[in-house]
Image: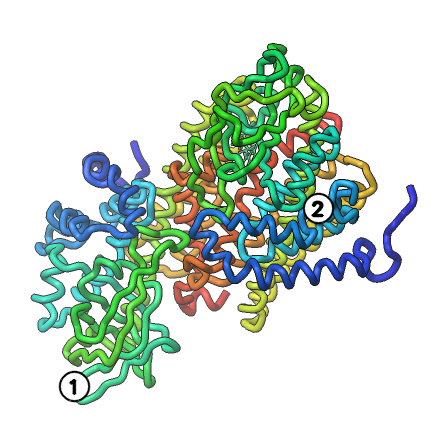
């Protein structure tokens, strides 16, 4: 029996999804990392199989637990990229769905649900970007850094603060005045095709406004809460992969006349890694379960902090156990290690809600 | 023992050290930092850097004048290592440290006049590039199990085998190499050779693609019936294991000094950026600073003993271990404080986080250091 939050149906889904990943994704991950881009068919294919979370027929949409299985298994491709790309797309889709502006349904929501168009969500930094309302238009100038999916997305849901206004607008990447430049060779998350987007006098119809004010604030919180769970799951998946790599390398590499796996200090190291992974996994699964019934940002933040710190530890030790080989690009453990550090760098970036601030 | 410590505010460094520090700083600022991103991309740094540093005397700071060195003390070497490690990457300084502190000290210590003339002097002038060849595909931590074999034939030795992860390996002129010269198992049958890389049968089988230290080139070497003259045997036949264990102490000392440069650099970058963001940030900075200062004091105190001719292997192993962990920790925490912005390709702190990870593997892993410490405390 797996963890209690999973029903038999979830377990069956996990094993069939694993197969799909093995057949269609795993062998490509090295190329995607090298290209620093995941091809669009990735989202299209998941949509076709009804595996993005939400589906055109809402009755068939996944429950929270199913989505958790999806993200965790995607992370076990050994890179954060695919799961992050899907998460950003899903955030865009669910925002469109929750705010439900009928004008935006055909070109954005429906197309995205079918996987024909890909979305992403970004918060504008007021220092880098201005969003002004003029005669029925939003006028956008400036730039957005670190836009995930930048290299593949067709549209962007922009969270902005300006002139005492705040809200979300939908921006088509095909709009005049937008240029997208990929940021190559980031520390990690390479396949998520992080980009810089520049806006020069871009005009976006006010009909593209999804929500503003308090409603926008609420949506921001929902997105951040979703992010906390998804990132915890990704850390769990990558750490599991790292532990597997360490165990298997230690069994084959010989030094001082025996396999590394025979050295007690390394056995204890790996036992600690396994324990740490299990601690974090239990917290993460519990947060997934709770998310069906309520939102508790504080609890989710705790779970995320635990998951990131666990993944840093596990991936670092896994690299160490590989010795010099761990430092070589040909061994994937270096990527597990880089990708998890990226979560650590972003921890401060998830806007701390009052509940966290009150600590 | 006569103390040469300077009384007053700074016990380890004299005004000459301070002057050298300033010279190296200027050199790094003009000749290294502006190009380091380019070299990282290139996967190596220009050969001309050896010449430049040689002509400035930087490659022989603590070597006697009789072999073309500057005749300085060990703290001169420490100053160089610290300062070049503030160039914004670990790779270039590592290539230099191999030249000055890993491949050449055994030549001075165990070498013949011919070795001094033909290898050491040109290396100090920066005319010959040196590498150190210990590790092999099947042997890293367990040095006594190396398999590369030399068989004597007349006045020559015929070498066969492979060396792995060799820094400066793609363009070295010679390699200070650890080789097995008899069938005796373990450490007994090991000797050192100075192998010239233009000898037939010597080849670089591949340049390795690494996650960090990218401005330093790393190679796998193949030795296929490489004929080395007997006069290239370094030191005493069969004593190579002791000689290389002696060499490793110096390698670890300099690794610690280098790590200090890295941690100081990362701390400064973080402090510049977040010092004014409030008490929580200052608290984090203090945590990094505290660890750096502990590491610095222990390293200097050990370096002082080393500079007096002592080789305290327990303390050296301790500072190697501590400095590697502290440098990587400091880089990681600095990176976290700097946040997403610092993840970009040319940001020196994310680079140093990757680069400093090697300190916990190269020159003996963390685990190997702990094994030595355990033995030294009587276990
Ligand atoms: C970028 C780079 C540059 C390098 N430059 C050079 C160079 O110029 N010259 C050179 O000779 N070498 C060089 N090296 C090699 C380096 O010294 C070795 O990688 C290092 O000694 C570890 O050996 P290994 O990689 O074979 O790991 P292994 O020895 O296989 O060790 C793998 C893991 O097992 C652990 N382990 C091993 N034995 C034990 C034990 N008894 N108990 C507990 N744990 C144990 C290790 O700590 C490590 O975590 C370089 C390596 C790199 C990555």
Q: Residue B133: horizontal and vertical position, in percent?
A: 57, 30
Instruction: Rate crowding at label 2 as few (under 14), some (14 to 19) or many (20 or more) other CA atoms within 10 Å.
Output: many
Residue B299, image x, y percentages = 72, 47
For the residue pair B65 and A177, the one nearer the viewer reads as B65
**Numbered badge on residue B181:** none
Farthest-out residue, bottom: A135
Quadrant of the rendered structure where residue B234 is? top right
Task: Tell me the residue that label 1 is attached to.
Answer: A136
Disc 2 marks which residue? B60
- Chain bearing mark 1: A
Q: Can residue B373 be seen in this view?
A: no
**Chain ID for label 2?**
B
What SS does tag 2 mark? loop
Look at 74% across and 46% down and name the residue there.
B69
Q: Are marks 2 and 1 in contact (CB under 8 Å)?
A: no
Where is residue A243 shown, x and y percent of the image? 42, 35
Q: For ligand 1, give the image quadrant.
A: top right
The residue that appears at 63% across and 60% down in the rendered structure is B27
Q: Give the quadrant of residue A217.
A: bottom left
Asked if residue B290 can be seen in this view, the reply is yes
């Amino acid at each position: 029996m797996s963890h209690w939050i999973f029903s038999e149906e979830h377990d069956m889904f996990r094993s069939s999804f694993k197969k799909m990943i093995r057949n269609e994704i795993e062998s490509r991950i090295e190329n995607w990392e090298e290209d620093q881009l995941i091809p669009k068919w990735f989202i299209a294919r998941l949509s076709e199989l009804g595996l993005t979370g939400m589906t055109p027929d809402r009755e068939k949409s996944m429950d929270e637990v199913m989505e958790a299985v999806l993200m965790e298994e995607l992370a076990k491709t050994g890179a954060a990229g695919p799961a992050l790309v899907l998460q950003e797309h899903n955030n865009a889709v669910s925002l469109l769905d929750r705010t439900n502006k009928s004008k935006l349904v055909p070109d954005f929501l429906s197309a995205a649900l079918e996987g024909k168009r890909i979305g992403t969500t970004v918060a504008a930094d007021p220092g880098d970007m201005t969003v002004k309302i003029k005669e029925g238009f939003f006028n956008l100038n400036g730039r957005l850094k670190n836009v995930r999916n930048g290299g593949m997305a067709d549209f962007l849901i922009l969270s902005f603060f300006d002139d005492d206004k705040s809200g979300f607008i939908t921006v088509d990447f095909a709009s005049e005045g937008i240029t997208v430049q990929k940021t190559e060779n980031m520390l990690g998350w390479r396949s998520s095709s992080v980009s810089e987007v520049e806006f020069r006098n871009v005009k976006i119809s006010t009909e593209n406004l999804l929500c503003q004010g308090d409603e926008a604030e609420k949506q921001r919180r929902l997105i951040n809460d979703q992010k906390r769970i998804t990132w915890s799951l990704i850390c769990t998946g990558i750490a599991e992969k790292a532990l597997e790599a360490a165990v298997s390398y230690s069994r084959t590499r010989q030094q001082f006349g025996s396999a590394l796996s025979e050295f007690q200090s390394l056995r204890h190291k790996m036992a600690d890694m396994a324990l740490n992974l299990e601690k974090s996994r239990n917290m993460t699964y519990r947060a997934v379960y709770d998310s069906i019934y309520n939102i508790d940002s504080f609890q989710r933040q705790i779970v995320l902090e635990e998951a990131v710190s666990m993944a840093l530890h596990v991936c670092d030790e896994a690299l160490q156990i590989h010795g010099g080989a761990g430092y070589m690009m040909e061994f994937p453990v270096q990527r597990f290690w880089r990708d998890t550090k990226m979560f650590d760098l972003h921890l401060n970036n998830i806007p701390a809600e009052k509940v966290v601030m009150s600590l | 023992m006569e103390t040469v410590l300077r009384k007053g505010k700074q016990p380890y460094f004299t005004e000459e050290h301070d002057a050298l520090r300033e010279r190296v700083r200027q050199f790094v600022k003009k000749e290294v930092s502006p190009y380091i991103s380019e070299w990282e991309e290139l996967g190596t740094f220009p050969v001309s850097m050896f010449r430049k540093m040689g002509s400035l005397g930087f490659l022989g700071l603590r070597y006697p004048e009789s072999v073309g060195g500057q005749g300085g003390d060990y703290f001169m070497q420490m100053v160089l290592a610290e300062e070049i490690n503030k160039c914004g990457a670990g790779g270039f300084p590592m290539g230099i440290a191999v030249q000055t502190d890993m491949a050449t000290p055994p030549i001075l210590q165990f070498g013949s006049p011919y070795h001094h003339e033909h290898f050491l002097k040109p290396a100090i002038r920066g005319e010959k590039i040196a590498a150190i060849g210990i590790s092999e595909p099947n042997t890293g931590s367990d040095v006594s199990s190396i398999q590369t074999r030399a068989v004597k034939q007349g006045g020559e030795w015929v070498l066969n085998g492979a060396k792995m992860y060799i820094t400066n390996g793609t363009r070295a002129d010679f390699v200070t190499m650890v080789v097995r010269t008899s069938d005796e198992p373990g450490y007994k049958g090991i000797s050192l050779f100075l192998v010239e890389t233009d000898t037939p049968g010597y080849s670089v089988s591949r340049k390795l693609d690494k996650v960090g230290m990218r401005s330093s080139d790393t190679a796998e070497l193949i030795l296929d019936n490489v004929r080395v003259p007997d006069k290239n045997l370094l030191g005493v036949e069969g004593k190579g294991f002791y000689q290389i264990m002696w060499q490793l102490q110096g390698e670890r000392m300099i690794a610690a000094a280098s790590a200090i440069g890295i941690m100081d650099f990362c701390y400064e970058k973080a402090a510049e950026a977040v010092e004014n963001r409030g008490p929580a940030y200052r608290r984090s900075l203090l945590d990094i600073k505290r660890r750096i200062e502990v590491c610095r004091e222990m390293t200097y105190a050990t370096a002082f003993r080393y500079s007096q001719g002592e080789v305290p292997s327990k303390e050296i192993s301790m500072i190697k271990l501590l400095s590697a962990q502290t440098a990587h920790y400091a880089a990681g925490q600095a990176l976290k404080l700097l946040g997403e912005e610092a993840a970009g390709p040319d940001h020196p702190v994310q680079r140093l986080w990757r680069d400093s990870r090697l300190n916990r593997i190269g020159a003996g892993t963390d685990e190997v250091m702990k094994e030595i410490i355990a033995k030294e405390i009587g276990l």
